Image (tube, helix red, strand yellow):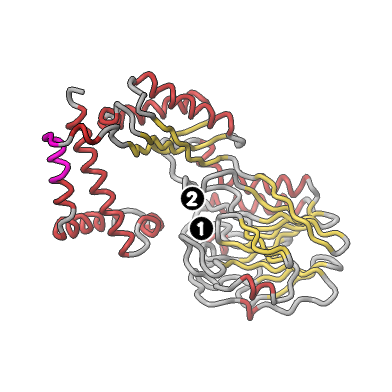
Amino acid sequence: MGIAFKAPFTWRVSIRTASNPASISPRCNHCDKGPRAAFERLVVVAIDEKVAALLIAGDLFDGQVRSARTAAFLAGQLSRLREAGILVYLIKGNHDAESPVTGAVDMPDNVHVFTARGGKHQLSDEVWIHGVSFKDRHEPNSLLDRFDAPVAGAINIAMLHTSLAGAPGHDPYAPCTVAELSAMGFDYWALGHVHLRQIHATTPWIVMPGTPQGRDIGEAGRKSATMLTIQDGRIEIEEVPTSGVTFEHRTIVLGADVETDDEIRAAMRDTIMNAAEACQDPAGVIRLHMTGAPERHWQILRDRDVWTETAREIARETGRLWLDKLVLDLAAPDAARDAGSALSELGTLMGDVRGEEAFASDTEATLGAVLGAVPAEVRARVAPDEEAARAFAARCAAAGAEMVRARLGGVGR
């Protein structure tokens, strides 16, 4: 994440060019190249706008990355900025604090990397840049005491990688509060870490710009950077789009009057085509949620694979959308009509079994084994604590029971 600075003093906030793009199936070229393409867009805009500097507030790349290709890409982009006379200021965050790429890249002389001890650098007669890097991947303590005092009579910009007082889905790194930042005396706080864009305050400016490119469906919506202009001692900001791939959630509501597959396909096509028309980036990845209580409830659940492929094919037809997954959250149009039937009794029996402590323990153990085989960041998102893991296991069991009923209930309907 970062900031860029243009004469008469314009800045841009937000860079994350992590080398591991979002995992999409099937993959598309836009998704694979998205993070790097977002960084290239920032470089192009910086050059076009004749900015004075680009500030990167941490997590420029992932710590595990050892790719020579990543090192070469970064060095090339930074050199483009050097040739245009643009300075680069960098602090390290939790992802790149220990990255071997840091030592592999011979940074051009236009790049200033702040250390974990902190420091300040004069950009112009009236502007100073302050920054503190992470020393290690985990930084549980506040870093505010490592900042130098603001320079009197100047505009002071401070760079910090932090989760502030805490953010859902993020570990508590370099914790601090908005009130504490406001009391430090800086004119603008360029923050990094949380991928959701938020303006926490305007006097002084405290801006978490988010990420320039979403990495997965959990980071939905068009992403951007922030252009900051300083003139006559005043600061103004502007959001500038940077993403090349938009992740979106779309919902298809099927009413009880939907009786045929043709009607379902038509609703699916309308939703996907509307998403394609609304997509402002070169490509989009959508997750479809099908809800409602249609007459063909059982058949849809039973034929989940068919409907998934149908949605995927329609998305392909747009030439710019890819399907992440189809989520079915359907209810029977009239559960009472099955009362007393064998299917209803089976549903009751499965509900009783799911309520047994032994079954719950077995389900949680199975889930634990599965989670052990997936990346740590996925485990942290799916089951951040024991209570969440239990709830997820219960949802999996309920979904399994519903699928069994769907397959049996669909027969003969």
Who comes first in sequence, dot 1 or dot 2? 2
Give residue 390's mark: none
For this view, does 386 lie left or right of residue 317?
left
- Position of the C terminus, as image quadrant, is top left
Where in the figure is residue 199, as x and y percent of width and height? 65, 59
Q: Nearer the viewer, residue 22 or 367?
A: 367
Q: Secondary structure at mark 1?
A: loop
Range of magenta residues: 340-349
Q: Would you say the magenta stretch is mainly helix, strand or loop? A: helix
User: Disc number at residue 20?
Assistant: 2
Amino acid tagged 1: Asp
- Circle 1 residue: 62
Distance between mark 1 and mark 2 Cα atoms? 7 Å
Confirm whether the magenta stretch covers residue 341. yes
In the displayed structure, 333 sits above or below 369; it is above
Q: Which residue is rendered at x = 17% and y = 22% of the image?
A: 412
Q: Residue at x 24, y 47 (%)?
A: 398
Q: What residue type is disc 2 on?
A: Asn
Asked which secondary structure carries label 2, the reply is: loop
**Residue in view at x 30 percent, y 56 percent:** 391
**Side of 39 where 45 appears, left or right:** right
Residue contact between numbered discs 1 and 2, judged by CB atoms under 8 Å: yes
Mark 2 Cα-neighbour bin, 10 Å: few <14, some 14–19, many ≥20: some
Crowd band around label 1 with a 10 angstrom C-alpha radius: few (<14), some (14–19), many (20+): many
Q: Quadrant of residue 205?
A: bottom right
